[in-house]
Image (tube, helix red, strand yellow):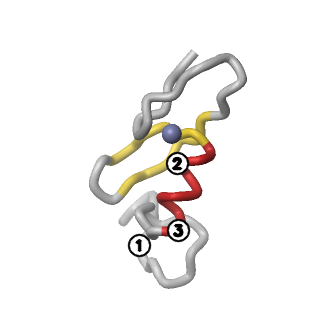
């Protein structure tokens, strides 16, 4: 059980992805919101090459 910290969506078949948001810290989001946040480069670290900060020590 869980719900998306961005849009509040919840449900059995919802896939939640844990991530570090630049402003909100560690959140769980649905795949829809994940894509939106990813597009806006809202994640700390991650696989984008331009980010530059380490998710563990940064
Ligand atoms: Zn969502």
Q: Quadrant of residue 7?
A: top left
The image shows residue 26, relative to residue 41, as above or below, that is above
Q: Which residue does the numbered mark 2 point to in the structure image?
A: 33
Q: Are marks 1 and 3 in contact (CB under 8 Å)?
A: no
Beta carbon at label 2 within 8 Å of ligand 1: yes
Q: Residue at x 62, y 19 (%)?
A: 11
The mark that comes first in sequence, 3 or 2, is 2
Between marks 3 and 2, how big is the CA–CA gap? 10 Å
Q: Are marks 2 and 1 in contact (CB under 8 Å)?
A: no
Q: Residue at x 45, y 58 (%)?
A: 56
The C terminus - image quarter: bottom left
Between marks 2 and 1, how big is the CA–CA gap? 22 Å
Q: Residue at x 41, y 63 (%)?
A: 42
Image disc number at residue 53: 1
Q: 47 left or right of 43?
A: right
Can you name the residue that lies furthest to the left here?
A: 23
Q: 10 left or right of 42?
A: right
The image shows residue 54, relative to residue 3, as above or below, that is below
**Label 2 vs label 1, nearer the camera:** 2
The mark that comes first in sequence, 2 or 1, is 2
Q: 21 left or right of 14?
A: left
Beta carbon at label 3 within 8 Å of ligand 1: no
The image shows residue 12, relative to residue 20, as above or below, that is above
Between marks 1 and 3, how big is the CA–CA gap? 18 Å
Disc 2 packing (10 Å; few <14; some 14–19; many ≥20)? some
Q: Which residue does the numbered mark 3 point to in the structure image?
A: 39
């Amino acid at each position: 059980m869980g719900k998306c910290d961005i849009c509040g969506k919840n449900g059995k078949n919802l896939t939640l992805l844990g991530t570090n948001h630049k402003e909100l810290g560690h959140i769980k989001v649905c795949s829809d919101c994940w894509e939106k946040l990813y597009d806006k480069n809202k994640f700390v670290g991650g696989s984008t090459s331009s980010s530059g900060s380490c998710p563990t020590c940064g």
